[in-house]
Image: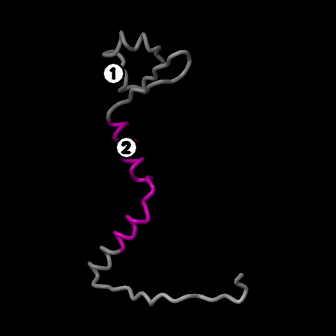
Amino acid sequence: MKWTLEEAKKQLPSIINATSQEPQLIYTQEELVAAIVDPELFKEFLNWRQKIAKTSLAQVFKELQELCTEENYSLEIPPRSDRFFENSR
C-alpha cells in the first residue's frame, strides 16, 4: 500500500501491522522514500544479498590458503625471472 509521509507518521502502528500482508511504501511528492516490510521478508533479503556479494581476491586467497593447510598441500612457486619478448619496445 502507498502512504504519504504525513499519513505514515500518524498511522505507524497500522502500517507495521499491514506489513504481514504486503510491503508498505512511503512517498513524499511521488518519490518513494521508504518501504516497511515484514521482518521475515527482510531477513530473506539480507541472506540473498550476502550470497550474491562479491568476494574479494584477498578473501579467495585466504580460503585457498586454509584449504591447502587442511589438506597438507603446498604450492610450489617458481622463482621470478625477467621475461624478454621478441617484439618488446
Q: Residue at x 37, y 36 (%)?
A: 41
Residue 15, placed above or below residue 42: above
Residue 43, placed above or below residue 34: below
Residue denoted by label 1: 16
The image's mark for residue 46 is 2
The answer to if 48 sits in the magenta stretch is: yes
Kind of residue at badge 1: Ile
Q: Nearer the viewer, residue 32 or 38?
A: 32
The answer to if 85 sits in the magenta stretch is: no
* Label 2 residue SS: helix
Question: Which x, y percent locates residue 75?
Answer: 38, 85
Q: What colour scheme governs how the chains and residues are painted in the rendered image of this protein?
A: one colour
Q: Nearer the viewer, residue 85 or 39?
A: 85
Residue 46, placed above or below residue 18: below
Kind of residue at badge 2: Leu
Mark 2 burial class by Cα count in 10 Å: few <14, some 14-19, many 20+: few
Q: Main secondary structure of the magenta part?
A: helix
Q: Residue at x 50, y 16 (%)?
A: 28
* Label 1 residue SS: helix
Residue 19 horizontal side relative to residue 2, left or right: left
Mark 1 burial class by Cα count in 10 Å: few <14, some 14-19, many 20+: some
Residue 1, placed above or below residue 71: above
Q: Residue at x 44, y 65 (%)?
A: 57
| Picture quadrant where residue 65 is located | bottom left
* Magenta residue span: 40-64
Question: Which x, y percent locates residue 80?
Answer: 48, 87
Of callouts 1 and 2, which one flags the residue occurring earlier in the amino acid sequence?
A: 1
Where does the C terminus fall, quadrant-wise? bottom right
